[in-house]
Image: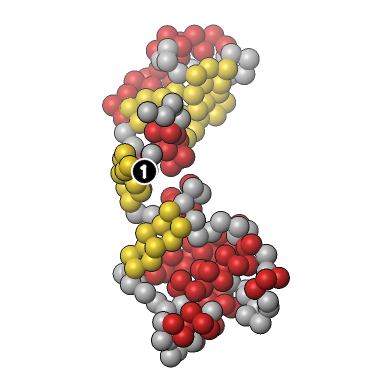
Amino acid sequence: MKVIAKMRRMEDFSYAKELLEFFEINPDAGLKRMSKGMKQKIGIVSAFMHKPDVFLLDEPSSGLDPIMQNKFIELVEKVKEEGKTVLLSSHIFDEAEKTCDRIGMIRNGKLINEVTIDELRHSCSKTYKFELKNAHDLEKIKSAFPTSKYNDKNNQVTVFISDDEINWLINVLYECELRYFKEENHTLEEYFMQFYGGDDK
């Protein structure tokens, strides 16, 4: 790290020390004896310690344990609040959802789609899961929403609808007895698989 700091002509090493403490790194430990996760943390500190305006990060949290992944996300949020730009390549969906404002899907080297996190969270498509107390109510749901998923054994239903069908769902359920009802949040992984789940073209 001192070599990198010298290459960047850093005169103030205080922020680097702060980052070392934040990621619980012993700077005197030999690099060759470090684990993959420890080496990854060294790489993160090296990328952030000179406070650049633009960050280009490739799988930055690979090899980190969950606690350190959360610390990395916290660090990214901090530099974003400072007005810095972060370009991040990652296959960790939870990390991307928590750190990115806009996400691009790349397939076969081409950008095939872009979506903002707000668009993903406020999608017009909704998914609701519920369980009915009575088996005969299941037939009402099947008649109203034939394309939904059903578990006849447990009277469980997963309904996929658009925003303008919510009132219709409520009207149908009004005459049914429920054990539970909840909305399922659409995840980045589900959105991602819409583009990657099929055969390559």
Inspect the image, locate mark 1, and give the three-letter code of the amino acid beneath it: Gly
Q: Is residue 19 above or below residue 168?
A: below
Residue at left offset 57%, top offset 26%:
179
- The image shows residue 26 at horizontal and vertical percentages of 65, 78
Residue lying at 42% horizontally and 9% vertically, measured from the top left? 143
Q: Position of residue 104 (x, y in %)?
A: 34, 46
Q: Quadrant of the C terminus?
A: top left
Residue that protrudes farthest toward the right in the picture: 33
Can residue 175 be seen from the camera position used here? Answer: no
Q: How many marks?
A: 1
Residue 30: x and y, percent? 68, 76
Pointer 1 residue: 109
> In the picture provided, is 28 more to the left or to the right than 166?
right
Q: Nearer the viewer, residue 160 or 89?
A: 89
Visible in this render: residue 114?
Answer: yes
Residue 70, by quadrant, is bottom right
* Quadrant assignment, res 25: bottom right
Picture quarter with the N terminus: bottom right
Q: Residue at x 51, y 82 (%)?
A: 3
Residue under the point 57% across and 65% down: 40
